[in-house]
């Protein structure tokens, strides 16, 4: 009996040590999705869910990616009125509608036709565009001109073109977070193209450290600052890397102002938003803030104390400055 107890005790101790080692050993997954790279780190279980995660990415892409001709969003944009949308599309649609209303239209994924015209869509070529052309395209912009009925998208104008890229990375990240949590994983970091969602802490009890980039316009990458995160999402939007040059030499940035239809530079170079929300939310807010500009964003934040930001801008002296709340 005593011998059996000792064997059982040893076995239990070995199991505990093994479990502890599994918990302390991270699973790291890397790859390419949504036109950018992803990194996933999680603890708690010694199991790689890479195949399941890749499938989830593919499912989201097939729903809301404008870069896949057969995706639901591409078919809807091309005039297919018979598309029965899935849960992914509906969730992104309703989230977009909510933040469209909250930001008074500064976040608006129906700017797709303008995104394409300014050369930031799948074709990536700057079309000949002037104020008259912008005015014509603006007729089709407005999330209040689209709705969902019986799992189908209804557009007031067939020319309205959806572009969920400003919320899609964050949403895809949320889908992976849900999956990990369904597997009882309580400590993870998910990063897709600079958008981040974290939960819990590392085994050493430390919070997750994430890097913010300097707004370098020469294409180089360097650290601007580091942030400590736990149980929150972070997303950044900036105009210092993605831009187009017109034959006239004028510079057009990738953030389209849904109020004007134009894509001109402002003194706000980058907006980073951190909150205990879905990453889709902070992704959308970051885009909205770039369209709002510095002063309107600071005013907007007065009524949103749960949104924490790092706004990098050029001050009146031409120097790099920041606003944090």
Image (tube, rainbow, N blue to C red):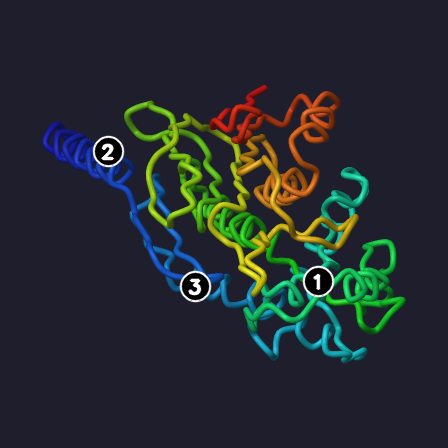
Name the mark on residue 241.
Answer: none
Q: Quadrant of residue 60?
A: bottom right
Q: Up-down: is 76 above or below 99?
A: below
Q: Residues within 10 Å of mark 2 (few under 14, many from 20)?
A: few
Residue 59 spot, x, y in % from top left: 55, 67
| Residue at mark 2 to residue at mark 3: CA–CA distance | 31 Å
Choose between 133 and 123: the one closer to the eye. Answer: 133
Residue that mark 3 sits on? 54
Circle 2 SS class: helix
Say which residue appears at 34% left-offset and 34% top-offset: 223
Say which residue appears at 65% left-offset and 24% top-offset: 306
Give the quadrant of the C terminus: top right
Q: Up-down: is 205 above or below 87?
A: above
The reply to whether callout 2 and callout 3 are in contact (CB within 8 Å) is no
Choose between 324 and 240: the one closer to the eye. Answer: 240
Say which residue appears at 52% left-offset and 37% top-offset: 234
Residue at the front extreme of this rendering = 248
Q: Up-down: is 275 above or below 262?
A: above
Say which residue appears at 19% left-offset and 31% top-offset: 13
Circle 3 SS class: helix
Q: Earlier in the sequence, mark 1 or mark 3?
A: 3
| Residue at mark 1 to residue at mark 3: CA–CA distance | 31 Å
Residue that mark 2 sits on? 16
Q: Residues within 10 Å of mark 1 (few under 14, many from 20)?
A: many
Q: Nearer the viewer, mark 2 or mark 1?
A: 1
Residue that mark 1 sits on? 114
Residue at the right extreme of this rendering = 156
In the figure, is residue 154 to the left or right of 106?
Answer: right
Choose between 64 and 296: the one closer to the eye. Answer: 296
């Amino acid at each position: 009996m005593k011998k059996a107890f000792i064997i059982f005790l040893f076995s239990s101790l070995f199991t505990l040590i093994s479990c502890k080692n599994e918990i302390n050993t991270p699973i790291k997954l890397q790859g390419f999705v949504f036109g950018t790279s992803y990194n996933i780190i999680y603890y708690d279980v010694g199991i790689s869910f890479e195949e399941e995660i890749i499938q989830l990415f593919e499912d989201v892409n097939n729903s809301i990616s404008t870069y896949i001709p057969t995706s639901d969003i591409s078919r809807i944009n091309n005039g297919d009125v018979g598309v029965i949308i899935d849960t992914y599309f509906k969730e992104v649609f309703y989230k977009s509608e909510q933040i469209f209303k909250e930001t008074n239209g500064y976040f608006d994924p129906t700017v797709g036709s303008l995104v394409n015209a300014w050369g930031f869509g799948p074709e990536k070529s700057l079309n000949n565009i002037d104020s008259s052309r912008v005015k014509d395209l603006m007729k089709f912009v407005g999330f209040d001109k689209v709705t969902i009925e019986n799992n189908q998208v209804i557009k007031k104008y067939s020319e309205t073109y959806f572009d969920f890229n400003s919320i899609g990375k964050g949403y895809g990240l949320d889908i992976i977070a849900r999956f990990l949590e369904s597997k009882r994983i309580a400590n993870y970091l998910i990063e897709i193209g600079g958008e981040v969602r974290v939960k819990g802490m590392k085994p050493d009890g430390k919070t997750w450290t994430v890097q913010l980039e300097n707004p370098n316009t020469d294409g180089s990458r360097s650290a601007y600052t580091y942030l400590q995160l736990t149980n929150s999402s972070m997303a950044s939007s900036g105009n210092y890397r993605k831009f187009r040059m017109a034959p006239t030499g004028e510079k057009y940035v990738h953030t389209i102002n849904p109020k004007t239809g134009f894509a001109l530079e402002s003194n706000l170079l980058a907006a980073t938003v951190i909150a205990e929300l879905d990453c889709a939310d902070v992704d959308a807010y970051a885009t909205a803030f770039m369209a709002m500009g510095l002063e309107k964003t600071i005013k907007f934040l007065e009524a949103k104390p749960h949104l924490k930001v790092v706004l990098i801008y050029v001050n009146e002296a031409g120097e790099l400055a920041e606003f944090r709340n």
